[in-house]
Amino acid sequence: MRWETQGIGPRSRVFRGVIRPMYAGARSVAFRTIDGLLGVRTTQATSSNGAKSLDERPPNVSWGWLSLVRLLRRHPLGPTDVFVDIGSGTGRVALAASWMFRCRRVIAVERDPRLHARAVENLRTCRATPRTPIELVHADALTWDLPADATMIFFFNSFRGKEFQELVERMLESLDRSPRSVQFLYANPVEAEFLARSPRFELIDVVRSWRPRADWTRTTSVSVYRVR
Ligand SMILES: C[S@@+](CC[C@H](N)C(=O)[O-])C[C@H]1O[C@@H](n2cnc3c(N)ncnc32)[C@H](O)[C@@H]1O
């Protein structure tokens, strides 16, 4: 699947200078309100307003609360599932999965000590009662061993290129050692072309949020793969 990137014309300047900042501002207010109701802090102070392209957003932004709930409703976790967020930031995705479903385990792996500490604090202060215990792991996902029973992996912009390929290799090795079917939920799938070349990744769904431009639509889409 290919998403187009559009050039920089007057319409692009309006998009970058007016539409996107307005949207980002409204979104930030909405997400802070949700954070406040839940008693957590998962919304970053930084925004993408100044970025030339949507892929230049700060590396620690979280996947949107509403898109997350929509995604997990469409791809729910069952009682035997083990959910892993690779590069989990302040823990928003893991928290949502644990509140929404009773499954075996929810694991959040984060390399940055400050974000990991924030996730620990969020877990302590959150008002919603988790249905599934969360394990917050402070580790580099590229040296951490994926649990042999992991069945659903969420990944949003943690890294790309060589590091992404290394993650894919580690995932496939884990499947070879412990054969099972895994769902890979890939948010903002910049490396989709790499996955399309692997016969072991089958694209089974694309969960899109509508946006006025193709590149914006890609950055707010989740490609769901069945991995064997
Ligand atoms: C875009 S954020 C996504 C956070 C979270 N998944 C969410 O949607 O709320 C990507 C995260 O990956 C983390 N990260 C980057 N490289 C990593 C690595 N090798 N191991 C673990 N975490 C990593 C970053 O520190 C950052 O918090």
Image (spheres, rainbow, N blue to C red):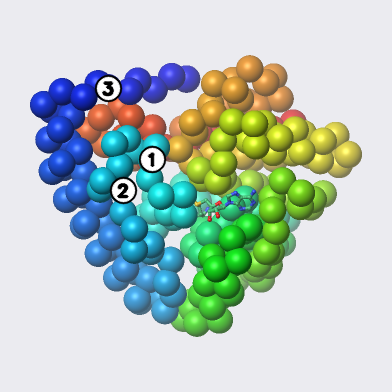
* Spatial separation of the CA atoms under disc 3 and disc 2: 18 Å
> Residue 54: image x %, image y %?
34, 38
> Residue 156: image x %, image y %?
51, 45
Label 2 close to label 1 by CB (< 8 Å):
yes
Q: Nearer the viewer, residue 202 or 88?
A: 88
* Spatial separation of the CA atoms under disc 2 and disc 1: 7 Å
Q: Earlier in the sequence, mark 3 or mark 2?
A: 3
Name the residue tied to disc 2: 48
**Crowding near the residue tagged with mark 2, few <14, some 14–19, many ≥20 C-alpha atoms within 10 Å:** some
Q: Amino acid at mark 2?
A: Ser
Determine the residue located farthest toward the right in the rendered image: 177
Q: Secondary structure at mark 2?
A: loop
The answer to whether 47 is drawn above or below residue 135 in the figure is above
Q: Earlier in the sequence, mark 3 or mark 1?
A: 3
Rendered residue at 54%/78% (across/down): 121
Name the residue tied to disc 3: 6
The answer to whether 38 is drawn above or below residue 49 in the figure is below
Rendered residue at 25%/30% (across/down): 213
* Spatial separation of the CA atoms under disc 3 and disc 1: 15 Å
Q: Amino acid at mark 3?
A: Gln
| Residue 105: quadrant of the picture | bottom right
Residue 143 seen anywhere in this rendered image of the structure: yes
Question: Horizontal placement of 161 versus 35: left or right?
Answer: right
| Residue 7: quadrant of the picture | top left
Label 3 close to label 2 by CB (< 8 Å):
no
> Residue 18: image x %, image y %?
13, 43
Question: Horizontal placement of 119 versus 29: left or right?
Answer: right
Name the residue tied to disc 1: 56
Q: Amino acid at mark 1?
A: Glu
Rendered residue at 30%/42% (across/down): 51
